[in-house]
Image (cartoon, helix red, strand yellow):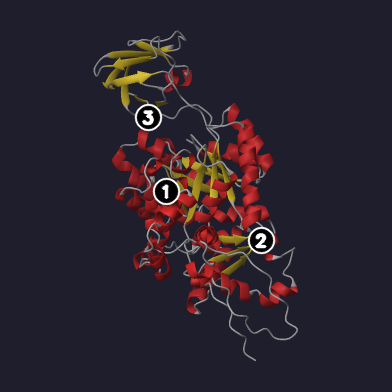
């Protein structure tokens, strides 16, 4: 049901167009509002020359509350939480790199920003990191940064004409000869693939659009038969779903990128092309605890080693793009549910990504199937959902984040979401820390607590409580800004500066912490304490 104040406002002739033009968004996005977004109230009030309280009466300052003589004065606090639990990751790119757009995306719902190191220079990424940190300081809320390294890219060489047409059933050779190819052969500059392939191995080209099957193998080339033909142009990708390739997950470029981002203090490293546990161990050794490793599960071989990989990684991403190329399409939803279930049992944050709101690259609203896809990820128990090209290069980055925020919030309001979340809760961890986390959730539900506060120098306590998926929100408190940013993936959190903590609670916070927490969680003024 639409807020009455907004209903009255939009009933005025021309107001929808005026707001859309002033904010630089579509009229469709304005028409879909149920209430004016909190971060847009001031802009719209100025635009329409109206008092802010007439647009959102619920945000009007509360009357002064009772405060006993001698009690410490309350200080202004940032809003601690959003209206949802599941987090949103937004990828930055040409459409979303300005300071204004990054702030708009954060206020619209983006909790973490992803930097794609397949594109852009270190200077470009350094500028984006600085902008994110400036926005973080302005809004007073921790913002995480995910550095997604490229990983090895397997590609064919070039063609004399730039492009050929492969016919189904024809023979086609992949060899080590760097000479530009034609309709009969092309260079494959990866001897590892030739060495690992066997008779009958399938090769997928151009994101799976073409399929070849190996018929003969020689030391310097593979003879193949075209199973599914089509056009093939220069430098198109090659996928080998049937075999484990003796290729490390980190290239020299990746190592240089890791050195750069670790010096910048980012929170998460997205690790591509993982096939074996050893790939994760290598990345963790380089990171040395300075960032969480987020394994991108996009290879069938990784699924075969899922338990070992999950035991080593800090968090995980269901990267459905490449996974959908190398797995039969009907296997992808099953793999997604298995990965989410495994991550939940281990208490490791899990992200569902790729093509979630793909149509919003060029359209202001998503398809209904995409909306259901996001909702399914939330029902499954994902800690976060991710936008890729929608925000990096799309025409409607703000609308995409706003839409995802609305979908997630609405799903979490459904009684079935809570019922399914409780039913999928894993058993207690067999440790004293795990038992305490389980007990904290049980006590909070028994006394109907408004919030569970976790104090942690590393974030491990917050992770354990988040594994329990309690009914009330989790407030992660820490003295480390870096840890607070990491916790942005799993729970509401404030860094030390935001909550005025320096090693231990000050008297002011210890005496009155319930007041800002109550206001932030419930959105109401604190009641006067009893005598």
Mark 3 element type: loop
Q: Earlier in the sequence, mark 3 or mark 1?
A: 3
Would you call the spot at circle 1 few (<14 residues within 10 Å), some (14-19), or many (20 or more)?
Answer: many
Mark 1 element type: helix
Q: Which mark is residue 478?
A: 2
> Relative to residue 332, is residue 348 drawn left or right?
right
Marks 2 and 1, how far apart in space?
29 Å
> Residue 514, percent across and down?
62, 76
Quadrant in which the N terminus is drawn: bottom left
Quadrant in which the C terminus is drawn: bottom right
Residue 49 to residue 69: above or below: above
Which residue in the protein does label 1 denote?
Answer: 339
Q: Which mark is residue 424?
A: none
**Residue 180 visible to an observer of this rendering:** yes
Q: Earlier in the sequence, mark 3 or mark 2?
A: 3
Count up the numbered dots: 3
Which residue in the protein does label 3 denote?
Answer: 207
> Residue 326, percent across and down?
37, 33
């Amino acid at each position: 049901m639409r807020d009455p104040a907004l209903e009255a406002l939009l009933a005025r002739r021309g107001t929808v167009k005026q707001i859309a033009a002033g904010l630089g968004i579509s009229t469709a996005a304005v028409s879909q509002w149920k209430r004016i977004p909190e971060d847009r109230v001031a802009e719209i009030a100025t635009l329409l020359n109206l008092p802010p309280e007439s647009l959102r009466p619920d945000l009007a300052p509360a009357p002064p509350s009772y405060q006993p003589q001698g009690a410490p004065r309350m200080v202004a606090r940032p809003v601690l939480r959003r209206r949802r639990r599941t987090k949103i990751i937004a990828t930055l790119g040409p459409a979303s790199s300005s300071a204004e757009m990054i702030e708009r995306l954060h206020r619209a719902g983006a909790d973490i920003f992803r930097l794609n190191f397949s594109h852009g220079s270190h200077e470009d990424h350094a500028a984006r990191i600085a902008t994110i940190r400036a926005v973080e300081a302005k809004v007073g809320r921790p913002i995480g940064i995910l550095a997604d390294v490229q990983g090895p890219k397997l590609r064919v060489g070039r063609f004399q004409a730039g492009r050929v047409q492969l016919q189904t059933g024809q023979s086609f050779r992949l060899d080590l000869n760097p000479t530009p190819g034609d309709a009969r052969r092309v260079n494959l500059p990866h001897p590892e693939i030739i060495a690992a392939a066997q008779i009958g191995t399938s090769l997928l080209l151009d994101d799976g659009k073409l399929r070849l099957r190996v018929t003969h193998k020689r030391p310097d080339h593979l003879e193949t038969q075209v199973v599914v033909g089509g056009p093939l142009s220069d430098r198109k990708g090659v996928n080998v779903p049937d075999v484990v390739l003796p290729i490390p997950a980190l290239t020299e470029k990746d190592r240089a990128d890791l050195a750069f981002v670790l010096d910048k203090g980012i929170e998460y490293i997205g690790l591509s092309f993982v096939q074996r546990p050893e790939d994760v161990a290598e990345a963790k050794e380089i990171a040395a605890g300075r960032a969480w490793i987020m394994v991108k599960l996009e290879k069938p071989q990784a699924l075969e080693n899922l338990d070992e990989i999950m035991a080593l990684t800090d968090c995980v991403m269901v990267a459905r793009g490449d996974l959908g190329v190398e797995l039969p399409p009907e296997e992808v939803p099953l793999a997604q549910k298995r990965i989410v279930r495994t991550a939940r049992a281990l208490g490791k944050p899990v992200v569902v990504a790729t093509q979630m709101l793909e149509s919003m690259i060029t359209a202001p609203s998503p398809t209904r199937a995409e909306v259901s896809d996001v909702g399914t990820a939330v029902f499954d128990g994902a800690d976060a959902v991710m936008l890729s090209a929608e925000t990096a290069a799309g025409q409607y980055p703000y609308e995409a984040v706003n839409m995802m925020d609305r979908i997630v919030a609405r799903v979490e309001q459904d009684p079935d979401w809570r019922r399914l979340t409780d039913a999928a809760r894993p058993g207690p961890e067999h440790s004293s820390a795990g038992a305490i986390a389980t007990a904290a959730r049980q006590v909070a539900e028994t006394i109907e607590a408004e919030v569970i506060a976790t104090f942690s120098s590393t974030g491990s306590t917050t992770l354990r409580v988040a594994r329990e998926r309690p009914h009330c929100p989790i407030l992660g408190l820490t003295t480390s800004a870096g840890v607070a940013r990491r916790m942005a993936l799993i729970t509401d959190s404030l860094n030390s500066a935001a909550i005025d903590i320096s090693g231990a609670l000050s008297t002011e916070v210890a005496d009155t912490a319930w007041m800002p927490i109550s206001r932030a969680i419930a959105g109401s003024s604190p009641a006067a304490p009893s005598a």
